Image: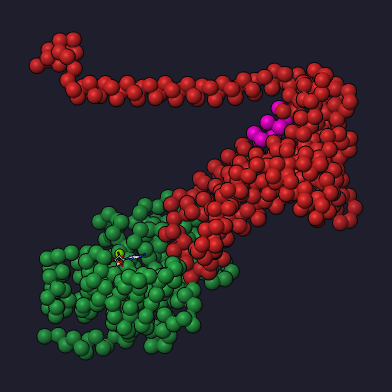
């Protein structure tokens, strides 16, 4: 018996042959998969590495605290860094409440009919609209119609349009992931709809919504085209008014009206210059932008971990 | 022979169901049901799977209102006063008087304390010591206090399945409901956890009227004062439990309780 099973002595049975063939094609697929991952990873590593090698020497306190300058060695990213942060602040402050509200409404409140189906399809498709189109919309709406100017407010609202569909979709998915047994438990205790939403749905969905928000903001922080469309400046040698004032009423919203630039625009501006020193500046600004994105993501991951730890059903 | 009529009429009715029909869209799941739940008694609802036990149970706290296309006909009258199926009665009002424990334990992903306190918070109760007293009282009534009194701040999902179900019972008890609905509360639990819950059930009827769906004949026989047998959406027979199990009027009921079909 034992000898008849040894591969050398007998030809393969049809079953063994079939197994062998299918194994071979599985292996082939695994190799193709590894190859694809390698291409993706290597491109990423090469890009980041090149950015670091080129830009790292330039990264210092002076670079972070200086304004743009015709002299490459004196130029820094201060205005762009502050601009990016303030624009993101406006974007988050508007897109998050509106997006969560819209997602919640679509998921929990709207009556299911043809009209709501139409809205749903459109909201989902909004996420795929090219960002320059949002720029054009914002140009007409915010800059000319509402007269908000070429300001931080306009920029923040423009990017909010971009982020909105992402937040809406994330909110809906997060809410849909909550089992109906928890809803029923809340209602069975005599909760009203708003109590169910605010005591249960939103707290339980928050971790996943947050992930969507960060994905949206990470996309927005690198956007250039729509901001160029509404007229971002590339050369700014002053900071907007501080939001916190020493005199009454201590909080000021003047900064919303200030002209602005953001990191990707500053980068683009430097890259398009002939001097090699500016290429180095651009790379360094790229590192700053990348760090900002990474920072947002790690905060989100941490918060999500903290929240999800206490959720189980 | 026991005089059935006199014992039935001795317990005053808490809930009277008359000519109840219920529809999931076009599909009628409850057909002309009449039923009386005597006050401070346990009534068991039995019947083969799919006969409409859960559907009937969920009429008592208007749970069907949560989904579109559901429709009730007929009356469910509480204390001889209000028809809780009336359009003028808000389902929230009904659920504040009628508690529910589900088939699978479904504690909120909150602390043990907050789970039990939730019903009070929903009602706008702010007094902390009152809430703490109520939580303790409810946990004692559901025989969970000794196991959890030193870990009230822990998350509810750290409890075992049986403990979670008793927590859900405590959650329902904390607001002093008049009627509690149980939908096969032990079907997801092991025998010991089942035993614990059956043991506490008997003590509960001092304070509350109970309607319990169960697929276990033994459970119905052990626990309940009255048993109602449903078949294909209809109420075939309802009587004192020993009558249903020993001398049911209908052949189908006799067959079902003796395990001939299920
Ligand atoms: N949401 C629903 N929509 C439509 N039909 C349902 C729904 N829930 C239950 N049913 C149907 O109603 C009948 C009774 O179901 P159910 O009350 O769950 O039975 P039981 O609890 O006695 O097993 C079954 O035929 C079931 O298929
Ligand atoms: Mg059922």
Q: Is residue A155 magenta?
A: no
Res. A56 image quadrant: top right
Q: Nearer the viewer, residue B195 or A52?
A: A52
Q: How many marks?
A: 0
Q: Residue at x 70, y 46 (%)?
A: A134
Work out whether residue A238 can be spotted: yes
Q: Residue at x 16, y 74 (%)?
A: B253
Q: Nearer the viewer, residue A192 or A100?
A: A100
Q: Residue at x 65, y 20 (%)?
A: A49
Task: Give the colour chain B carries in the figure.
Answer: green
Q: Position of residue A195 (x, y in %)?
A: 55, 65
Instruction: Give the magenta-colored segment's residue range.
Output: A287-295
SS majority, magenta? helix
Q: Nearer the viewer, residue A131 or B262?
A: A131
Q: Quadrant of the N terminus of chain A?
A: top left
Q: Residue at x 64, y 22 (%)?
A: A47
Work out whether residue A64 can be spotted: no
Is B62 above or below relative to A218? below
Q: Which residue is situated farthest in the top direction here?
A: A8
Q: Position of residue A268 (x, y in %)?
A: 76, 30
Q: Which chain is red?
A: A
Q: Is residue A288 magenta?
A: yes
Q: Which residue is situated farthest in the left direction here?
A: A1
Is B105 above or below relative to A37? below
Is A229 above or below relative to A277? below
Task: Say whether residue A255 is left or right of residue B227.
Answer: right
Task: Say whether residue B233 is left or right of residue B85.
Answer: left
């Amino acid at each position: 018996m034992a000898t008849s099973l040894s591969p050398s002595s007998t030809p393969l049975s049809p079953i063994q042959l079939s197994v062998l063939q299918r194994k071979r094609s599985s292996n082939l697929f695994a190799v193709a998969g590894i190859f694809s991952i390698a291409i993706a990873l290597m491109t990423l590593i090469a890009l980041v590495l090149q950015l670091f090698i080129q830009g790292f020497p330039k990264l210092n306190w002076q670079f972070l605290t200086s304004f743009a300058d015709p002299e490459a060695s004196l130029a820094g990213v201060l205005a762009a860094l502050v601009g990016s942060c303030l624009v993101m602040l406006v974007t988050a402050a508007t897109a998050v409440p509106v997006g969560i509200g819209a997602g919640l409404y679509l998921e929990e409140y709207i009556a299911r009919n043809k009209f709501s189906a139409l809205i749903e399809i459109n909201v989902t498709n909004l996420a795929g609209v090219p960002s320059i189109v949002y720029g054009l919309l914002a140009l007409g709406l915010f800059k000319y119609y509402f007269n908000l100017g070429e300001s931080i407010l306009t920029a923040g609202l423009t990017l909010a349009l971009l982020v909105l569909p992402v937040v809406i979709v994330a909110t809906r998915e997060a809410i849909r992931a909550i089992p109906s047994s928890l809803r029923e438990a809340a209602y069975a205790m005599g909760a009203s709809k708003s109590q169910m939403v605010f005591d249960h749905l939103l707290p339980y969905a928050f971790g996943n919504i947050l992930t969507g928000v960060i994905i949206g903001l990470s996309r927005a922080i690198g956007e250039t085209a729509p901001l160029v469309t509404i007229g971002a400046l590339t050369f700014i040698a002053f900071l907007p008014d501080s939001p916190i004032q020493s005199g009454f009423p201590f909080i000021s919203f003047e900064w919303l009206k200030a002209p602005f630039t953001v990191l990707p625009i500053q980068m683009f501006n430097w890259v398009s210059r002939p001097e090699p020193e500016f290429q180095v500046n651009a790379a360094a600004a790229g590192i700053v932008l990348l760090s900002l994105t990474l920072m947002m993501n790690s905060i989100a991951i941490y918060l999500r971990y903290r929240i999800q730890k206490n959720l189980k059903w | 022979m026991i005089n059935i009529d006199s014992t039935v009429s001795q317990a005053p009715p808490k809930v009277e169901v008359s000519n109840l029909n219920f529809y999931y869209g076009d599909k009628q799941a409850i057909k002309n049901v009449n039923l009386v739940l005597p006050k401070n008694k346990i009534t068991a609802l039995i019947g083969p799977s799919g006969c409409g036990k859960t559907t009937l149970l969920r009429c008592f706290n208007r749970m069907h209102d949560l989904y579109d296309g559901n429709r009730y006909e007929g009356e469910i009258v509480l204390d001889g006063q209000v028809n809780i199926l009336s359009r003028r009665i808000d389902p929230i009002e009904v659920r504040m008087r009628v508690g529910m424990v589900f088939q699978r334990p479904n504690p909120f992903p909150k602390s043990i304390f907050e789970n039990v306190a939730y019903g009070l918070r929903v009602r706008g109760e702010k007094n902390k010591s009152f809430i703490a007293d109520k939580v303790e009282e409810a946990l004692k009534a559901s025989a969970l206090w000794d196991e959890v009194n030193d870990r009230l701040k822990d998350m509810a999902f750290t409890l075992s399945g049986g403990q979670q179900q008793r927590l859900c019972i405590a959650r329902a008890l904390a607001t002093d409901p008049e009627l509690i609905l149980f939908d096969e509360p032990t079907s997801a639990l092991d025998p010991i956890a089942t035993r614990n819950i059956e043991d506490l059930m008997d003590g509960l009827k001092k304070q509350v009227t109970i309607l319990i769906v169960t697929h276990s004949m033994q459970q119905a026989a052990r626990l309940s004062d009255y048993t109602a047998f449903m078949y294909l959406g209809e109420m075939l027979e309802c009587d004192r439990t020993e009558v249903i199990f020993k001398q049911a009027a209908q052949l189908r009921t006799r067959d079902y309780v003796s395990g001939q079909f299920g």
